[in-house]
Image: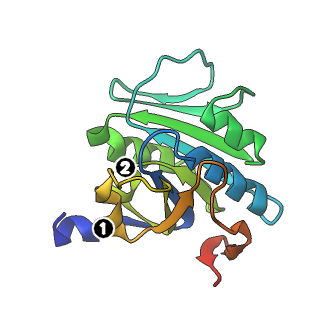
Amino acid sequence: MTQVEKDTKIDYPNLLLIAGNGRNVGKTYFACRVIESLSKQAPITGLKITSHIHAHNSNDVLLKDKHYLILQEKQITGKDSSLMLQAGAKQVFFVMAEPKYLPEAFDKLSAYLPETPIVCESGGLHDIIHPGLFYFIQLKETQVKKTQHLIHNPIIVINDGENLKFDYTKIQLINNKFSLIS
């Protein structure tokens, strides 16, 4: 990434970003625990972004393009985006976008995003924004496969297979911006 590309990133201090070292490492679990913890203090928006376009049986289409699809989750199911809703998010958006079209999709979505806190699960969003906090979830005793995330200096949370080693009360909201207390 060049300095020019770095400087074109948008600051999103009200967005907490979660990436992980692959599938089934605990990203959604972590997102839901953060939402549960903070939704009593402020309305939280959930956001799930994937680079894979999935078939969907939803009437909740917000925006559709041949390269991306944005849904507003309203269904109670076992899907990750629905789990965020069930955890206490006031609203949840689910974005499916090919990586090169993520900036366009996120730009379109940003018109719907509130200035209140957003908890987002995405592997690619860090390439276009500066989040308030950035977490990387990793299974204990596994090698980091997604090293591209480490250049952003994430807070690494270890999943031992039963629990995530993290105190959720350390994440605080101050004027709708995320901060971490020590």
Residue in front for this viewpoint, 79 or 174 = 79
Q: Is residue 72 left or right of residue 133?
A: right
Q: Residue sitting at 75 percent across and 57 percent down? A: 43
Q: Which residue is mark 1?
A: 151
| Relative height, residue 64 to residue 148 (above, below) | above
Report the Cα–Cα distance between label 1 and label 2: 13 Å
Percent position of residue 131, x then y: 47, 66
Q: Mark 2 or mark 1, which is nearer the start of the sequence? A: 2
> Mark 1 packing: few (<14 Cα in 10 Å), some, or many (20+)?
few
**Which mark is on residue 26?**
none
| Relative height, residue 153 to residue 91 (above, below) | below
Position of the N terminus by quadrant? bottom left
Q: Residue furthest left?
A: 2
Q: Is residue 61 visible?
A: yes
Dividing the picture into quadrants, the one containing residue 40 is: bottom right
Percent position of residue 170, x then y: 68, 75
Residue in front for this viewpoint, 117 or 108 = 117
Position of the C terminus by quadrant? bottom right
Q: Is residue 27 left or right of residue 53?
A: right
Q: Residue sitting at 75 percent across and 47 percent down? A: 90
Q: Name the colouring of the figure.
A: rainbow
Percent position of residue 145, x then y: 32, 50
Residue mark closest to the camera, 1 vs 2: 1
Q: Residue sitting at 42 percent across and 43 percent down? A: 22
The total of numbered circles placed on residues is 2
Percent position of residue 136, x then y: 47, 59
SS at mark 1?
helix
Q: As shown in the figure, which amino acid type bears the numbered disc 2?
A: Gly
Q: Residue sitting at 55 percent across and 36 percent down? A: 94
Q: As shown in the figure, which amino acid type bears the numbered disc 1?
A: Ile
Q: Which residue is mark 2?
A: 124
